[in-house]
Image (cartoon, helix red, strand yellow):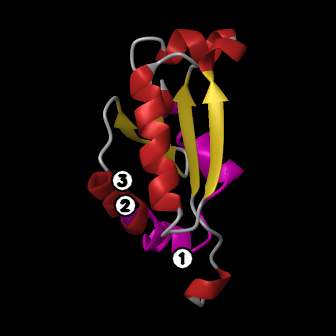
Amino acid sequence: MASDSIPPCLVEVYSKPGCSLCTETLAVVEAVRERIPFQLLERDVRQDAELSQRWRYDIPVVCIDGEVAFRGRLTPEAFEGRLREAASSPARARGETGPASQERHSDDLG
């Protein structure tokens, strides 16, 4: 399968407004996104009781293709490295990413 046909990684950031570390993390994510394309979903943990319970002591949390990649502080170098690693993974090349893959990794998120 050609790499051009592989969809970009899905990055989810679990955060909440007013969290300075969350703001910094989102700035890092957006800066890297200018160089490396990926889908981004920002999730406000206050909007869902389960998310609030799950992440209340860990935010910000950054997941790449359904797997927790970072909790707390994030550097551009570390994020870019993990993103490139995820984008070139054999599972991604086989098409094992997206919602079905995220369901398999749901235990990693708890």
Main SS category, magenta section: helix
Q: Which residues are magenta?
A: 85-108
Rendered view: 44 above or below 86: above
Amino acid type at image mark 2 = Glu
Element assignment for label 3: helix
Residue 66 drawn at (x, y percent): 55, 45
Residues at marks 1 and 2, CA–CA distance in whole angstroms:
19 Å
From the image, state whether disc 1 or disc 3 is nearer to you: 3
Residue 11 among those drawn in magenta: no
Residue ID for mark 1: 93
Circle 3 crowding by C-alpha within 10 Å: few under 14, some 14–19, many from 20: some
Residue at image x 31%, y 33%? 73
Amino acid type at image mark 3 = Phe
Amino acid type at image mark 1 = Ala
In primary-sequence order, the first of circles 1 and 2 is 2
Does residue 60 appear in this view? no
Residue 29 drawn at (x, y percent): 47, 49
Residue ID for mark 3: 79
Quadrant housing the N terminus: bottom right
